[in-house]
Amino acid sequence: MTQSKGELIIKENIIKNLIIVILAFLFYPNLQNALSDIPPEATSDLLLIISILLVTVSFASFAFTYEKINLKSIGSRILAHSATFLFLLITALLLEVMVIAIGLAYPPLFTIAIVFSILLYMSIILYDFWDLFRLQ
């Protein structure tokens, strides 16, 4: 049974996103340990830097489109998945840093930060899949 190139790239995308989620969970304890040493008065500066980096990676991520790749070329698909993998991984890790920093500086807002970050990340993943489905 052969699968179409569209089905194949969707399966590749699912695998890519699962790897990102696993890596994000694996990095969380290390990020939490690293951020626990930051003085509370520096948290607002850290959150500002994280916000700027999130905007930057979001611009890069949303500028990319699967419509411009050659589905028949494995090299083109690998390059596309590599780029989106990095965009999504950086986004996930920056959101984790933001949530941890908010939890350390503003404990009552920790749950809200987690919920908003998960919703934001889910919307970015959905956008990534939507962009793929436009190929079909």
Image (cartoon, rainbow, N blue to C red):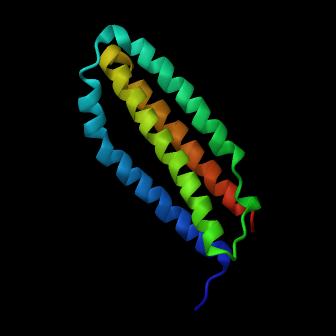
- At which x and y percent is residue 20? 43, 52
- Which quadrant, please, contains the C terminus? bottom right
Q: What residue do we see at 54% from left, 58% from top?
A: 82
- In front of the other: 69 or 114: 69
Q: What residue do we see at 41% from left, 31% from top?
A: 114
- At which x and y percent is residue 33? 23, 31
Q: What residue do we see at 25% from left, 38% from top?
A: 29
- Which quadrant, please, contains the N terminus? bottom right
Please tell me whether residue 64 is drawn above or below residue 10 in the rendered image. Answer: above
In the rendered image, the residue lying farthest to the bottom is: 1
In the rendered image, the residue lying farthest to the top is: 41
Where is residue 6, by image quadrant? bottom right
Left or right of residue 69: residue 34:
left
Q: What residue do we see at 39% from left, 30% from top?
A: 97
- At which x and y percent is residue 111? 37, 27
Please tell me whether residue 91 is drawn above or below residue 12 in the rendered image. Answer: above
- In front of the other: 65 or 79: 79
Left or right of residue 10: residue 19:
left
Left or right of residue 108: residue 112:
right
- At which x and y percent is residue 75? 61, 70
Where is residue 112, by image quadrant? top left
